[in-house]
Image: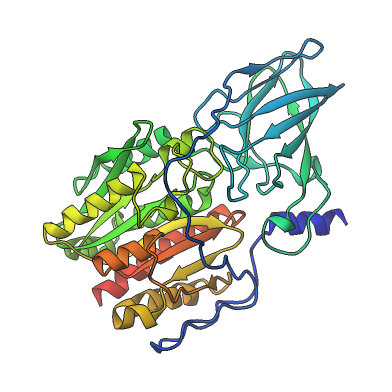
Amino acid sequence: MFRNALRVFLVLVLLSCGIAACKSAKSDAPKAPTGYQGQGPNPVVSTLTKPVQRQWKGIWTFQDSTVYFTNDFEGGRLNGVAHSGGNAYTLWITAENTPINPSPWYAFKVWSSQPQEIKLQFTYDGSRSRYYPKLSRDGVHFKTLDSTNFRLINPGEGEFGIKAAPEAIEITVAVDSEPTWISAQELYTSSVVKSWIDSLSQKPFISTYEIGKSREGRAMNLMEVNGANAKRALMIISRQHPPEVTGFLAMKSFMETLAGDSELARKFRQEYTIFNAPLMNPDGVDNGHWRHNSGGIDLNRDWQEFNQPETRAVRDFLKGKSDAGYQFVFGADFHSTWDDIYYPLDTLITGDKGQIVYDWINAISERLPQKKTNISASKKLEPTMVSRNHFYAAHGMPAIVFELGDNTPRDFLREKGRVAAEEIMRLLLE
């Protein structure tokens, strides 16, 4: 029973069959294979700024305990702790506001003045436990908690979605005087992402600059990969939703491959310029939000009204480049969800121009047949609430929402990002 429940919760996604072949006819959208079918049509929602509840930041101490907790760091989220007696503690994880997608992010440090094992029960305000815990001793290198130290409480039902997740979880952790980080996913905060793009910008053909500010004044950084001032361009974005780290990791590998030293990459940079906004929601990431920016809004619903400064920054950047003569030929927005899935626009909307997206999906699946990736094509361009639709409507840019599973193995994420980059380069050069 434990193994079955754990399998349901982790949704570990090394599936055995390849992706279903994409149909190239304009009148036919590709059909998703059996498995994760993705989310339904996005409802129209207001993106006017709403209040968010800010966390209390500090250290929790207890009169009859030598154990301490803190959320006082970038990406931290812990809304409350109670000492349940003995070596047991109950943790509360709540969202920044509601209604909200059930993505209950948590990240905190715990330590003890006396070495011991402690039990931590995670509870969520009206949600369930989506993310399997990751542990670190330095806040940089994380590993998945050993399953022998993990217990489900009221397991969910089904294979995908929040109903398949347990109501709560309990973990056992050994602590000592040095802090242990416990996090829903690896911590890639604004400072970590900035260090990454700064390291890549040591290459002579890569530059970084600010294209705007977030609502709380954090920099909206953009990385430009420009080998020969080519006017044909790609636009790549990531992390509109703070917990979606697996999408970021695939995007990171994608960009590193485009900026790499292979003969294919060098040739590609002579013909195409790549623009990358790797961290669309720096406020949400650094504040440990479940979903929204500091304006309380899902940024990937604001690509029509542009009420939030983060989406406006990218909109204005793209318009400026288009006015300067750039032609955008491909766009990708990297996300995370329950399993790997592609969300392209149907070729009934894009015609021949959008066919490259399906050719790209097919090319990736031929090289990575060991992992089934689902497809859910959209037959509606309006309203242009999501980035993919805005990219095409405003710039004629074939674009896709590229989602990676929450628990997709990290080495496979890197491989998929690399293969995806190689195949888009090959197709565009052809």
Indicate the position of residue 64 as horizontal and vertical percent values. 82, 11
Q: Position of residue 49 (x, y in %)?
A: 43, 41
Expressed as whole percent of the image width and height from the top left, the position of residue 85 reads 86, 22
**Quadrant position of the C terminus in the picture:** bottom left
Q: Is residue 308 visible?
A: yes
Q: Measuring 54% from the left and 35% from the top, which residue is drawn there?
A: 288
Residue visible at 24% across and 45% down in the picture:
203
16 in relation to 208, above or below: below
The quadrant of the image that shows the N terminus is bottom right
Q: How is the image coloured?
A: rainbow
Which residue ends up furthest to the top in the rendered image?
A: 63
Q: Which of the 4 image quadrants contains residue 63? A: top right
Q: Is residue 324 left or right of residue 18?
A: left
Which residue: 48% across, 77% down? Answer: 366
Relative horizontal placement of residue 217, taking residue 326 as reference (left or right): right
Q: Is residue 412 visible?
A: no
Q: Is residue 375 above or below residue 282?
A: below
